[in-house]
Structures are given as C-alpha cells and as structure tokens.
Amino acid sequence: MLHTGDEHAFTEEDTDLFELLCQRRGWSDQYLKKIESTEHDELLDLAEMVEALADAQAKGKKITIAPDFDMDGISSGVLGYAGLSELGFDVELHLPDYRRGHELAPEDVAEIHAKWPDTRVLLTCDGGVNSHRGIAAARALGWTTLVTDHHEELAPGSTADVTVNPCRVDETYAHTGICGAHVLYQVIDAYARVHRPEKLWEIHLLRLFAGLGTVSDVMPVLYENRQLVRDAISIARLLRVPAPKTIPNPWGGFDADPDAIDVEQSILMQLLRTEPHHPVFLRAFEGFAVVLKAFAQVGKIRDVDDLDEGFFGFYLAPAMNSPRRTGAPLEPCFAVFTAASADVKLTAARQVIETNQLRKRLVIEHTEELSTGDQPLAPWVYFSDAYPGMYGLLANRMMELNGHPVVVVNRPVDADDFVSGSGRAPGWFDIITSLEPHEGLSAIGHQQACGVRVAKAEKLGDLVAVLQEATQVARLTLSTDGTSGDLVLGPDADCDAGLEDQQALFELVRRTEKLKPFGQGFTVPVVEIAIEPLGLRVDRIGSESQHLRLVTRSGLSCLWWNVAEEKFDMFRSFVQRASRTELGTLRFTATLQLNTFRGDTRVQAVINEQITAAA
C-alpha cells in the first residue's frame, strides 16, 4: 500500500487506519498512480480551431467571446478574454443574460452585432453545441462560428464551423468529464504551442481559471483534472496576501486587518508587473487577488491552507452563481475580473458576496415552503414559486433529504402548460438518460444536474413514474451492506479504533490529506463516529450562535454547522440524563480534518449527519 513517510511508528498491535481506509476504498498503489496520469488524446478538431484562430489574427478579424453565465462560464470567458488578449488578438467579451437560458440565443448575437459591429468571429465557451438558433443567426451575419463546450451534443449535432467538445457524438476523448474552461484552455494552449511558444508561461497561468471551472462544475477530480486543480490552487495561493497585523488587541499584540491587504504585494502580481503584459490579462489575475481579499474581509480566508478546492467549490463558486439564483445583476461577477481598477473590482466582489448571503436566506425560506406546502407529486417532483434560478438549489436540498432524484418546477395553471425546472440526482442516477426515451420529457445539462422540460403539465405524472421506476432499477446495483462511513471510530464493539489516540487520528488525516484534491469521483473519506454522551460538552458557537460543538471526554472537538437552534437543547438534555442513566453511544458521519490554533494542531471532526437519534 501507499506510504508517505510516517513520523509515527505503528506497533504490530496498532490498527493502521490509513492502510485500512485505502483497502476499503480500493485505493491500491496501482489505482492511485493511474488516476494521477495527465496523458490524454487531442480533442477532435482542436487543430482546425487553432488554424481558424490563426487565420482570424492574420487577417485582423475581431473575435467576440460568448460565455455561459455560471462559474464555469465566467471562468471560461475570463480565461479566453485574458488569454487571447495576451496573444495579440482583437477580442471582446460578451456579457450573457441568464434569463435566456444556457444556450446562445439570437438575442445574444444581435447584442454583439450592435455593440461590436466589426465582429467577424464568434467564439462560444461552456455552451453553444446545441445552440442552433444562435449559431444560425451568427452565420447569417457572415461570422465564423467556433464552439467550445463540454455538454452532451444532441441531434442533429452542432452547426458551427468548428466545434471542440469532449462530449461530441463522434468524440473518442477518454475522460469526457472536463469543464468548459478546460476545453477552451486546451485550445488556447495548443495555439500558443504552435504560434506563440514564448507565451506558454503566461498561458499556463490561466490554468487557475480552468481548475476553478473544474471544481465549480463538479467535474471528476481524476486524471488530467487532478493536476489541473492542484495547479489552480497553487496559482491562487501566489495571489493571496496575508492580512497585515495592524489592529491592537487587549493582550498587547496585534490582530490581522484584512482591509489593509494590498493585492499588489502578492507574489504573482509582483512577477507579472516585471514584464509588459496586456491590460486585460493583468486585470484577470488582479481580480482574483481582489476576490481573495474580499473573502478574507468576511472571514472565509484566514490562512493559506484555507485556499483549496473546498474554497473553490463551497465559497467562490456559489457566490459567483448567486446572481442567477436570485435575479440579481450578473455584471459584478465579470467586473471582478475585467474592471480597470482594483477599487471597482473590490466593490464588485463585495456585491457578489452580499448577493450570496441573500441566496442562502432564500434557500432556507423556500426549502421550508417545499417541505410544508401543498406538494401532490412529492417526493419526486416539487412545485415552487421561487425565482427559477433557485430551482437547482432547491432540487439539490430535496434530493439530500429524500435520498433520490428530485425535480423542482414552476407550478402550471392548465394541463396544456409547458413546465420547466431543474433536476438533481445522486451520482448513481442519470436524469438525462432516464428521460430521453419518453415523449414530452427531456433534460439538458449534466446527468446529475440539469434543466428539465415537460411539454405539457398533464405529463408531470409520467415524470414522476419515470423517476420512481428508474430509481428502483438503479438502486438494485447499489451495495446495501456495510456502515455509513469508510471507517468506524469509537468505543463500540464494531469500531475499527477508538477516538482517544490523537496521534493515530492525526496520522490518518495527515496521510489522507496528501491525496488531495478531493471532489467528484474521488471523494473525501467519511468516518462513522460513535460518541459516549457521558462527559460530552455541548456548546453553541458562531457569530450568531448558530453552530454546535460537541467535545468528547478525550478532547475531540466535533463541529456541526447551522443546527444549534434545532439540536442544542436536545443534546444538552440528553447529556444530563446520561449522567444518571446508562445510555448508548451517539452515532454520526463526519469528515476529519486538522485544525491549528495558537501553534497547536489537533484533529477535529465536522459532522455531516446523525445516524442514531438522541432520545
């Protein structure tokens, strides 16, 4: 099995938890080596698109980039705008309108033509493969149409002049789970290798945005994606500036002041300023540094270790996706990376974060409405009066609660009404494939996260039946034995090891973290922990006392986010009864992580869910 230079020597009696974890996960040395391979074939028509770009540059043709509006689309658009600008192209970036949906629309083409009438080449990113009306409108203007996308190509196929897409019908690219930003990165990197090799270092830096798109679009963190995400994190860390300690505290020292961060002091910005670069290229990286400052100001980045794939996926991407969820303006999401001044960028970043706070509140409110309102098709299909951009988030919440695929749609008035919404499904269920054979039902996007369309409201019953039956079939292939975690830790007879040996837990987490990045397809290990209620300390923590902290007798701190209002009194009462009556252990699923406070690094658990109830 894999060894990573242990400082702790296990005796023969010890249980090597990391080795046991790898065994249960199937993480052999061979498997771990295999998924680290970055080798891949060239995407179909990549060379043709490179030459189309070369022709555009040679003839001085203006290129306008039309991206999608989610985090992958924003990443793609910024990557293309910055990269092509740095390579000397005459290029513009179109701001999409999320109210039109993900496909390039004729209205987008009309806006581009009105704003930049000398456009001669349209380049889409993270979309366009199925945008037949939009592509037709562009071709009617005589434009060359270049599509970079990663969504499934549907019949009759792309009508663009050149299409590069790992999910083309005729594509043989082995690892189709690459994001839209990664597809465009491969195009620009290939162009630089052929026509501007002296610019490869600058183009390599754009992996920051390709890696961000990979995490935000929940692509499998396998094969070429693994190194891409690592590179993105490394580049992001070069743009982070530690908050200077300038605020006096009562103990005679100084606390960090995120407001005093000067993004120009980041290592990468200092390097970039030593050589001439296109302003658009510089703005993209300055913008990312400003984003990191804005998140430091709200306490989400306190240390360089906070800047990882989790920050991309749980903080930055949801914030950038929040305007389309709430109906707020999309402009700040692009202005963060394209505005001319750092001050304007910072204002835009703060707007994005504020919109994200609104998004969080709305999710709570609308989830409550779905759970308590009139829902005749629950638990498979739910009607919502929320802003349509919220449907995907709500479907995801209800999927988590129900444990099976869920679709959230607008509430129709008549049986003939067209109905649309969003579907979310666990990794073992494919929504698009399940709906495809059924007339009047369709989905577009990704298999586990997609837009769902129902031709007539009268067919909603068919949608329920398809989801229900396909779920029954899919579940037959799932394993039903074993525990809820990869390891079971605690005092019970079925536990693999106890929770008292901090050194053993530390080694488990340390060695596991060496396998980062985690994500779709290579998920972070989950443990099942059994906790004795006797001597358990229960605290409320957080700025609004919204979180719960359980501290075991051995000193293991277990954090449970956003449940204090619901759980605090119940757990405190349970612990008090345990001092008088012998009670069984409490069981949770959790992830283990290292936490450093005042120079002391200890293991802590972050609870995912409770398995056994506190009666």
Image (cartoon, rainbow, N blue to C red):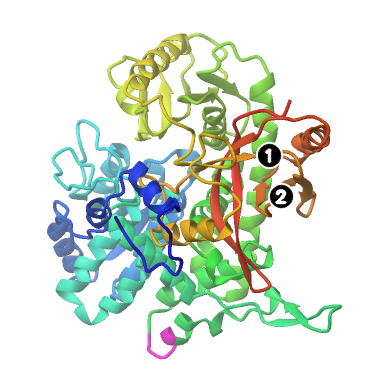
Q: Residue furthest right?
A: 250
Q: Which residues are magenta?
A: 271-276
Front position in the image: 558 or 547: 558
Q: Secondary structure at mark 1?
A: loop
Q: Where does residue 471 sit, x and y in percent of width and height?
A: 39, 19
Position of the N terminus by quadrant: bottom left
- Prevalent SS, magenta region: loop
- When the figure is inspected, residue 177 is found, relative to residue 410, above or below; the finding is below
> Residue 562: x percent and y percent?
70, 43
Q: Is residue 592 above or below residue 228?
A: above
Which sits earlier in the primary sequence, circle 1 or circle 2?
1
Report if residue 86 is visible in the image.
Answer: yes
Indicate the position of residue 118 as horizontal and vertical percent values: 32, 63
In the image, taking residue 498 as reference, residue 257 lies left or right, namely right
Residue at 17% in and 61% down: 52
Q: Nearer the viewer, residue 246 or 377?
A: 246
Q: Which quadrant would residue 300 be assigned to in this image?
A: bottom right
Instruction: Find disc 1 in the rendering and name its residue.
Output: 532
The number of discs equals 2
Q: Dot 1: few (<14), some (14–19), or many (≥20) neighbours within 10 Å?
A: many
Which SS class for mark 2?
Answer: loop
Q: Residue at x 59, y 49 (%)?
A: 499
Image coordinates of residue 78 in percent, x first then y, are 41, 63
Question: Which residue is at 13% across, 58% downward?
Answer: 48
* Disc assigned to residue 512: none
The answer to which of 437 and 124 lies nearer the viewer is: 437
Residue 421: within the magenta?
no
* Tag 1 and tag 2, C-beta contact below 8 Å: yes
Instruction: Residue type at mark 1: give it.
Output: Glu
Per the rendering, the mark at residue 553 is 2
